[in-house]
Each structure stands twice: as structure tokens, then as C-alpha cells.
Image (cartoon, rainbow, N blue to C red):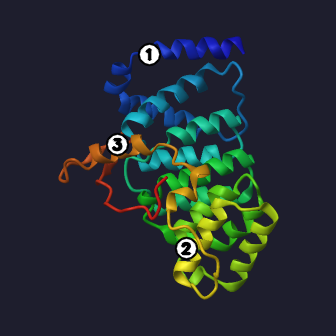
Amino acid sequence: MDSVKDSETKMAKLKPKDTIMRHPQILDEALHYFKQITTKVSLKGNLTLIQHLTKMESIGLKHGIPADGVDILLRLALSGNLAESVNTRILKCLIPATELHQNCITSAVSLFCTGKSTTSTRTLFIRWLISVFDLISCKDVLSSLYNFFFCLLMDDKMCPSLCHLLYLLTRKEHVKAYRVRSLLELQSRKGLQPHILGLLSIYKVFCPELVSLTLPSRIKMYFRNSKLLFASELKIITKNNSGDPVRDYRLGLGESMKPPPRSVKRVSV
């Protein structure tokens, strides 16, 4: 434990200016290290892991992570090979610098479905998906797993965030009488839950004949327990990366990136 604290203290002394000025090389080195992890790695006394993690956090929260880097880190966080505390730190600083490609989302969701990671990590991943929802171009990948996500609503810990994600994904074709019944039964067992009411509210928008409940019109009250992970940081990074529409964004991996398109979340918390 002391060695971990000592290493974190050393990393705290790293000058932010130095990290920012050299961030492409530093990020490249960190991603190369994380990509090599294929078996369980202990955090205790692992100075190399802590160093790369700390550097990546600094860069991710200031500049964002390129799409290929997001892919590497998501696979690792959901693989079950790292301590839960490390997975938490990865997901909380994993701000995409650009739009996310289909392979990244497909591989991450596939790992999520295997259940290799802990419930806490899986819940945080759902919150991460909600946080970056506007940057996911291939939402059909998530939509195709609508029923899978819906079936996980029985999990008390994941339920609030899953309701929020399903709210964002819901289209008219997803609204079925049996799903409304399931939500009402869930509500009767758990008591009055705002996140369940939130999902019912969007069902009522598409199929009012299936939902007879009178529901509040204020959307924010529904999903207070699944807050966005890095709302302010993402806003700043997106603004910085889209400031010049003719500029290429080369971030760490030598990848040319276009500014993310504008879009609006259906709910903001």
C-alpha cells in the first residue's frame, strides 16, 4: 500500500505543462502499455501501471482520447484483468476526442455481455455510454441489444443507468405491451422509482394507449442517479476540437480526425 501511495505522490509532481506539451508521445506510450495487458494484473506495487494511468488521466481530461485509444481502453476495462479501482479511473477519464466508430462500440458491448467485469464496472460502462451518446454514430449496434439491456433491469444496481440508456435508445418499434407490463410490475416491487417512470414516459410518448399513468413533464428528475461522467470536460474538448473545421486532429496515434457533428441529447442531467 505504501508503495502505491509513494508512486502516486511521485506522479503528482509531474508538471502539467510538461505532460500537455508531450501528450502525443506520452499517450502513445501509455496505450501501448495497456494494449499488452492480456491477463490479470495486480495494482499493488505496480509503479508502471500507476504511472501510465496517471498520465492518461491527465491527457484524457484535457485533450480527450482518440478513437483507437478508446477502443483499447474499453476492451481492457471490461476484460476483468484490472482492479476495479483502475477500471473506474479509466472510464471516468475516457473522453473521446472524436466520433466513435462501430468496431469500438461493438467490441465493448460484446465484452459487457460476457459479464467478465464486476457489476460496478458494468454500471459505470452504461453511464459512460450515456455520457458519450452524442458521439456514437452507430447507435443501431446498441439498439439491436435493446431486449438484452431491458432484461438486465432486474439488477438493482444497473437499473437506474439502464433505464436512462433505454430512454435514449427507445423508438416506437421498441414499445411493446409486454415491456410496459414488465416495467409496471418492476415498479410495484421496487416502489416509486423515478428512472422507471422516465422509461415509461418515453413509452407513453410513442404509444400513449399503452401507458395510462400520469407522468411528470420534467425530464431531469427521472435520471438523477445516472449522472454524466464528464459533462463539462467533454463540452470543452468538443468545442476545442471543432473550433477549426478545416483542421486535421492528430492525437497521439497519428490519426487524422474530423470535428464531431452537432447533436442534442434527448435528456440532460
Residue 182: quarter of image: bottom right
Relative to 105, 186 lies left or right: right
Residue at horizontal 66 percent and vertical 50 percent from the top: 123
Q: Amino acid at mark 2?
A: Ile
SS at badge 1: loop
Callout 2 crowding tier (Cα within 10 Å): few <14, some 14–19, many ≥20? many
Disc 1 and disc 2 in contact, CB within 8 angstroms: no
Callout 3 crowding tier (Cα within 10 Å): few <14, some 14–19, many ≥20? many
Q: CA distance from mark 1 to mark 2?
A: 48 Å
Instruction: Choose the circle earlier in sequence order: 1 or 2.
Output: 1
Say which of 80 and 153 sits in front: 153
Residue 249, x across and y down, in percent: 28, 46
Q: Amino acid at mark 1?
A: Leu
Q: Please identify, in this view, whether the residue under mark 1 or under mark 2 is nearer the observer.
A: 2
Relative to 157, 133 lies left or right: left
Instruction: Choose the circle earlier in sequence order: 3 or 2.
Output: 2
> Label 3, on which residue?
237
Relative to 265, 194 lies left or right: right
Q: CA distance from mark 3 to mark 2?
A: 30 Å
